[in-house]
Amino acid sequence: EPRYFGSYGNCYKFNSEFRNRKLRFSSNPGRRDAFKLELFVGEPNEFDFLKSHGSIIYIHDRKIQPITEIDGIMLETGYEHWIIIKRIIHKKKSKPYSDCVENLTSIDSYNSEIYKQTLKLAKNYNKKYCTQLCLQLYTIKSCNCSSENIPGSRLSEKVCSTLQDLECMYNSY
């Protein structure tokens, strides 16, 4: 599933059920059953305006959109990288045992505009996504523009791109 980000260039998503493709699973540890990926990122040239060369990889639940500024693992060109992950799922009990909301996919589960906007943008609640969206809304309110790499960039018609915009955005953090 190809996608383009102004800050990073071309992005591709693997194993996303794009066009009804069947998801691939591996439950065996070790190199033999590991997911292997070889990338050619091209050679840097004098007209390349990117800050650095290499790749950024995101490993995430397919139901949650990664946040480009936070979730990525940077990979340098010319080296072999091994990334080992283990998935652990924590589920907390809802009320009366805690203050947790039982259904995090329903827009009516929690009375908060940020919560509702998080669900509209991300389809599932995610605390990190909600925090970044809150920061994005504050940036829009303070600077009249939004960061293209934080959720909710489409909430503002203007992306922070001028030096004055970027200075305002970084000062608002």
Image (tube, rainbow, N blue to C red):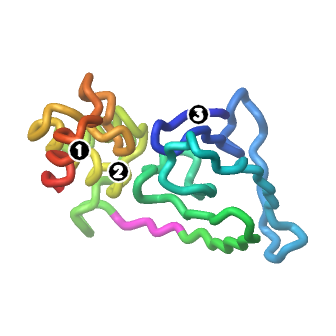
Asked if residue 91 lies left or right of residue 18, the reply is left
Residue to which mark 2 is pinned: 129
Residue to which mark 1 is pinned: 166
Residue under the image location 80 percent in, 56 percent down:
38
Q: Amino acid at mark 2?
A: Tyr
Residue under the image location 64 percent in, 72 percent down:
85
From this view, report whether residue 80 is shown above or below residue 94. Answer: below
Distance between the alpha carbons at the discs numbered 1 and 3 = 24 Å
- Mark 2: few, some, or many residues within 10 Å (few <14, many ≥20)? many
Location of residue 19 (image quadrant)? top right
Residue to which mark 3 is pinned: 3
Tell me if residue 6 is in the magenta stretch: no
Mark 2 or mark 1: name the one nearer the start of the chain.
2
| Residue 31 position in % (x across, y down) | 85, 74
Residue under the image location 13 percent in, 52 percent down:
172
Q: Is residue 64 visible?
A: no
Q: Amino acid at mark 1?
A: Leu
The secondary structure type at the circle numbered 1 is helix
Depth check, front residue: 30 or 4: 4
From this view, report whether residue 159 is shown above or below residue 142. Answer: above
Tell me the quarter of the image containing the C terminus: bottom left
Magenta: main secondary structure equals loop
Q: Amino acid at mark 3?
A: Arg
**Span highlighted in magenta in the image:** 89-93
The secondary structure type at the circle numbered 2 is helix
Q: Are marks 1 and 3 in contact (CB under 8 Å)?
A: no
Residue farthest toward the left in the current orientation of the protein: 142
- Mark 3: few, some, or many residues within 10 Å (few <14, many ≥20)? few
Residue under the image location 72 percent in, 73 percent down:
82
Residue mark closest to the camera, 2 vs 1 = 1
